[in-house]
Image: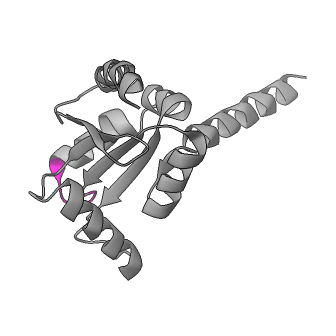
Amino acid sequence: VSNMYRYGIVLLFLLTTSSLRAQVFTHPDEAFAAMQAQDRPLLLIFQGSDWCIPCINLEHKVLSQPDFLSFVNNNLVVLKADFPQQKQLQASLVKQYEALAEQYDPEGSFPKILLLDRHKKVLHVFPVHYTTPSQLVSDLEKELKKGHAEM
């Protein structure tokens, strides 16, 4: 019975973990389709995953944490537009990211976090000083309450 219990806990953890990641996308087309299908706003994050120290810290301390992922899973669709220096991305993906950057991050800020409505209009640009998931979640909740009136 105790082994069955352990397997159940592991299975529950795996199922929960995979569902928490369901709303985080790296392909713009998939993210925008999910945003439309679910009628949810999109959190667009520009990052340099292998060279930008503030990006790496934000990913590690905030974006990959269960509290943030749980909030996202219930409220948002997330698109991470990554501009790595060491890792090679598909050329088609790089083109899509560059088009997004031209529209939403022409100054090339890393990291940059934007909340978009279902029409791809910027509702809010967030500061990037977050060190805990609760800080970002709190700010997102405030903006979503404001944004529902606009959306």
Q: What residue sits 22% from the left and 54% below the top?
A: 104
The image quarter containing residue 95 is: bottom left
Give the x, y percent position of residue 19: 63, 39
Asked whether 58 or 91 is in front, the reply is 91
Q: What residue sits 25% from the left and 48% below the top?
A: 56
Q: Is residue 14 left or right of residue 67?
A: right
Q: What residue sits 24% from the left and 41% below the top?
A: 57
Q: Quadrant of the N terminus?
A: top right
Give the x, y percent position of residue 15: 70, 38
Q: Is residue 53 left or right of residue 69?
A: left
Q: Is residue 3 left or right of residue 122?
A: right
Say if 46 sits above or below 146 in the image: below
Q: What stretch of residues is rendered in magenta?
A: 49-53
Asked whether 56 or 40 is in front, the reply is 40
Q: What residue sits 80% from the left and 30% below the top?
A: 8
Asked whether 19 or 116 is in front, the reply is 116
Say if 23 sits above or below 25 in the image: above
Which residue, as the protein is rendered here, is positioned at the far front? 150
Give the x, y percent position of residue 65: 42, 33
